[in-house]
Amino acid sequence: MGTTASLRGSDLRDLAMGLRGELLLPDAPRYDSARRVWNGMYDKRPAVIARCASAADAMRVVDFARAHQLLTAVRAGGHSVSGKSTCDGGLVIDMSPMQGVRVDPRRRIARVEGGALLQHLDRETSAFGLVTTAGTVSHTGAAGLTLGGGLGRVGRRFGLACDNLRSVDVVTADGRLLTASKDEHADLFWGLRGGGGNFGVAASFEYDLHPMDSTTLGGAIGWPIAQARDVLSFYADFSMSAPDELNLDMAMVATPEGLRIVLEVCWSADLARGERVVEPIRALGKPAFDNIAPMKYLELQSASDRRLAHGIRFYGKSGFITELTARNIEQLVDVFAAAPPGSFSIVIQQSGGAIGRKPISATAFPNRGANYWLMLSKSWTDPTQDGPRIETLRAAWKALEPVTDGLYVNAITDDERARVPINYGNNYPRLQQLKRKYDPNNQFRLNANVLPA
């Protein structure tokens, strides 16, 4: 099941005639642009790209893929770090034409189509003084982020993106369109919140929204890398007692001015109180720069967009951390200092807060007990650097992986099949049962794959 196949022209014509969207074959003028994904390391050539304009399109395409036993990839924003939103010789179900977002400000609900990006969601909700958790890079697809859990700058206050779901309309492997919510197909709804793309093609989502001012206290403050131990020790203590309204993401990076340790701040509540809360951060050591100031949430949400633009070549390794101990801090600093400058960045994204207060069994997302997500990553543009960049980063990760526990399925870069069951822990058998029920032949396997029970 799920192979490269020879397709008859008559079958393809029949499929194309049944779609509101367009069907692209390799000789189509728009094929090359449509097959490209965010991570430039993956230059794959699908046999067919079906650009869906509706849930009905997705149903027809899933039926076609199943009937012809085609290897199937699903694309929303195309942001899969491991390139699994495309494939060679198979079928890509491309939801990116479906980007509608409709906000109901009275009920505080957003209905979002399966191809919408985070920037579409944030722009619509912010116009009404509302928000839901939506990642940290605004050209990411909302679908992929949410199905894998969905960390974000307001996650500590409002929970993961998947915690804010009210319902998902999903096309399952048998071509049915099901609405999954706490009242309908509740078992599937549980699995969609953290189980990734294992159970079908998400055609639309409904999110709960929360009141939040469109202006936050945000920005970054940085110190020379020589102060890294002091800054990380402060961060370890300060972040553990920080209010839920404060999100603090740490990074050790190479900049044109030299190596820096940088703290990005997002305070999402009253600005005057926020100024008081961040005072100890500004008083720490001797900062090389400090641009923390009132700024639009939309501006903060797009701050990394250019650095992580479409077409870059990207690789990373990551895992969750419960606490930053003195030993962990020494390891982080030593690994960063031992590598040639610019080999990679070390990023620590804060978790905890509302994320950690939800029981592990409440959704498929298993990493509730972590207070941080750690990632070593590097982006570049020269294809000849792929091998050296990846090997350097893998070697560094070997020293840090033992301090982590579990993985973020939205950031898998290698074949992590062996780690997926370990990551989900006690939630994995339940996911396997769901897989057997909704996708017994593993049609949707280009993801952090759960094997059917």
Image (cartoon, rainbow, N blue to C red):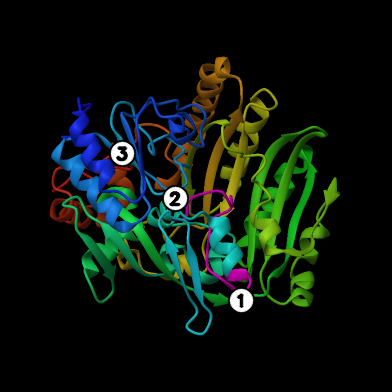
Q: Which of marks 1 and 3 is nearer the N terminus?
A: 1
**Which residue is at 18% across, 47% downward?**
63
Give x and y (percent) for residue 133: 52, 64
Q: What element carries label 1?
A: loop
As measured in the structure, the alpha-carbon distance from the residue carrying label 2 to the one carrying label 1 is 25 Å
Q: In this view, does 176 lie to the left or right of 310?
A: left
Residue named by callout 3: 446
Say few, some or many: other residues with alpha carbon within 10 Å of mark 1 (under 14 / 14 to 19 / 20 or more). Answer: some
Chain part drawn in magenta: 125-142
Residue named by callout 2: 97
Quarter holding the N terminus?
top left
Depth order, front residue of 117/297: 117
Residue type, numbered disc 3: Leu
Q: Earlier in the sequence, mark 2 or mark 3?
A: 2
Could you say which disc has been placed on residue 185 in the image? Answer: none
Labels in figure, total = 3
